[in-house]
Image (tube, rainbow, N blue to C red):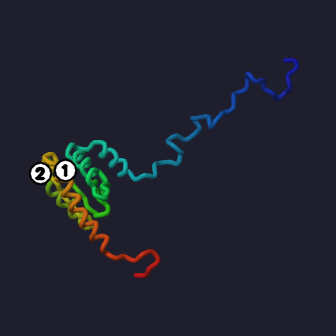
Amino acid sequence: MAGEIPGVVAVSEAKNPPRDGEGDRSAQPSGGGGLGPSLRRPEVYTARRQRKAMSLPEVLLWRELRAQAGGLRFRKQHPIKPYYADFYCAAARLVIEIDGKAHDMGDRPQRDEERNAFMESRGYRVLRVLATEVLADANAVAASVVQMAGPLRQSLRDCHLPMNGEDL
C-alpha cells in the first residue's frame, strides 16, 4: 500500500496491549499465587470440613461453651495429630470428647482408651461427655466443663517459669 511506513502496523491490525494486570491467562500459573502446593497442613482442611459437619450434641455444646466460657477460649475440631478433638481449651490443655452410641460398639471402646492414653501422654486432660447428657441439658454440661477448665487453667498459671531474659 502506498504511503505506509515500513515496520509499522496499522492500529486496526495490532493486538491491544494488556491493561490493569490482564494478560495471557493460560501462561500464568493458576491456584492463587503460583507458589506450588498449599503451605497449610492437610489436617487443617480436614478440621474445617469437620467443623461444618458437626453433630447436634456438638452444636448444642458449642453454643453453650461460647456463651458461658468465663474468659476461656474453646476450639472446635482441633487437630492433635493424628486425632481431632471435638473441643479443646488451650489454656487448660483440656480435650472434650462427645461420645454417642457408636462409642459403645465394636472395638470403639478400645480405640477410645488408646486415644485417651495418647492424649494424656502428651500432657492433655481428656473429658468424655455422653451425647445424651448434652441433649438433655447442654447448659449444665457446658457449666461443668467451664468449671473443670477453670482450675486447670489456674494450676498452669501457678507454675513459675522464667520470664524472657531470665536464667533458670
In the picture, the disc for residue 104 is: 2
Please rate how many residues cluster around mark 1, counting C-alpha atoms within 10 Å: few if below 14, some from 14 to 19, many from 20.
some
* Label 1: element kind: helix
Q: Give the amino acid type for the residue marked by disc 1 in the picture.
A: Asn
Q: Position of residue 46 (x, y in %)?
A: 33, 48
Label 2 neighbour load within 10 Å: few <14, some 14-19, many 20+: few
Residue at the (30%, 46%) spot, across then down:
51
Q: Is residue 49 left or right of residue 108?
A: right
Residue 6 locus on image (x, y percent)? 85, 27
Q: Quadrant of residue 120?
A: bottom left
Determine which residue is flagged by label 1. Answer: 139
Residue type at numbered disc 2: Asp
Q: Residue at x 58, y 39 (%)?
A: 28
Which label is found at residue 154? none
Q: Nearer the viewer, residue 31 or 130?
A: 130
In three-dimensional space, the C-alpha distance between marks 2 and 1, rounded to whole angstroms, equals: 24 Å
Q: Nearer the viewer, residue 153 or 37?
A: 153
- For the point 26% across and 47% down, which residue is it? 63
Location of residue 130 in the rendering, given as x and y in whole percent from the top left corner: 14, 52
Q: Is residue 100 left or right of residue 94?
A: left
SS label for mark 2 = helix
| Quarter where residue 7 is shown | top right
Residues 132 and 63: in front is 63
User: Do residues under tags 2 and 1 come within 8 Å of each other at their CB atoms?
Assistant: no
Which residue reaches farthest right?
A: 3
**First-in-chain label (2 vs 1):** 2
Q: Nearer the viewer, mark 2 or mark 1?
A: 1
Residue 42 at x, y percent in the picture? 38, 51
Task: Answer with the quarter of the image where residue 69 lies.
Answer: bottom left
Image quarter where the C terminus lies is bottom left
